[in-house]
Image (cartoon, rainbow, N blue to C red):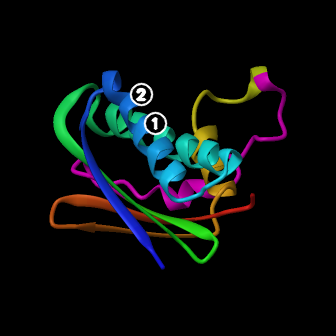
């Protein structure tokens, strides 16, 4: 049985805690254990902050749509925004200088890479003026 829930949020950093509360409530209702819930929260926080900072260049009234579904030992996530086209899947590969000392590495890019390490599947499309990212997050707990 798949349980599906949807929420929309304005693209504002002040509502970041609301996205985390949505994830937490979904996980509690669907028996997703704490460690898996924390992974899912990190993924959504990374996507959401990137939408605001890099997609819109700051807070926006444009909506972010997050749909979660649980079943078969995984949580599927559909993340949608209307920022300019951006496919994060290409950034799931390790940054070029990951093995360099911290002070020699460029700032940024590590969050999307880490996100890619937490999922088992991904698909991206830009459709009808929206970035759409489908992710599969395995439940390990």
Is residue 91 depicted above or below 69 in this figure? above
* Residue 112 drawn at (x, y percent): 57, 46
Is residue 23 depicted above or below 92 in this figure? above
Give residue 29's mark: none
Report the number of discs: 2
Residue occupying the point 84% across, 27% down: 101
The quadrant where residue 58 appears: top left
Is residue 38 depicted above or below 118 in this figure? above
Foreground of the two, 84 or 132 = 132
Which residue is tagged 2? Answer: 17
Q: Quadrant of the C terminus?
A: bottom right
On the rendered structure, is 94 left or right of 109? right
Q: Residues within 10 Å of mark 2 (few under 14, many from 20)?
A: few
On the rendered structure, is 87 left or right of 119? left
Which residue is tagged 1? Answer: 20
Say whether marks 1 and 2 touch (CB < 8 Å): yes
Residue occupying the point 25% across, 26% down: 59
Foreground of the two, 41 or 57 = 41
* Residue 38 drawn at (x, y percent): 62, 42
Foreground of the two, 104 or 71 = 71
State the predominant SS element of the stretch in magenta.
loop
Range of magenta residues = 79-102
* Residue 42 drawn at (x, y percent): 57, 40
* Disc 2 element: helix
């Amino acid at each position: 049985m798949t349980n599906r829930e949807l929420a929309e949020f304005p693209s504002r950093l002040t509502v970041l805690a609301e996205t985390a509360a949505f994830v937490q409530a979904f996980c509690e209702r669907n028996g997703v254990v704490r460690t898996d819930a924390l992974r899912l929260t990190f993924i959504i926080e990374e996507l959401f902050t990137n939408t605001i900072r890099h997609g819109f260049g700051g807070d926006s009234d444009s909506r972010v749509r997050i749909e979660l579904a649980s079943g078969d030992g995984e949580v599927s996530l559909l993340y949608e925004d209307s920022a300019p086209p951006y496919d994060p899947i290409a950034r799931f590969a390790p940054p070029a200088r990951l093995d360099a000392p911290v002070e020699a590495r460029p700032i940024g890019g590590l969050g999307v890479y880490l996100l890619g390490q937490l999922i088992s599947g991904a698909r991206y499309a830009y459709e009808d003026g929206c970035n759409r990212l489908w992710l599969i997050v395995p439940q390990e707990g």
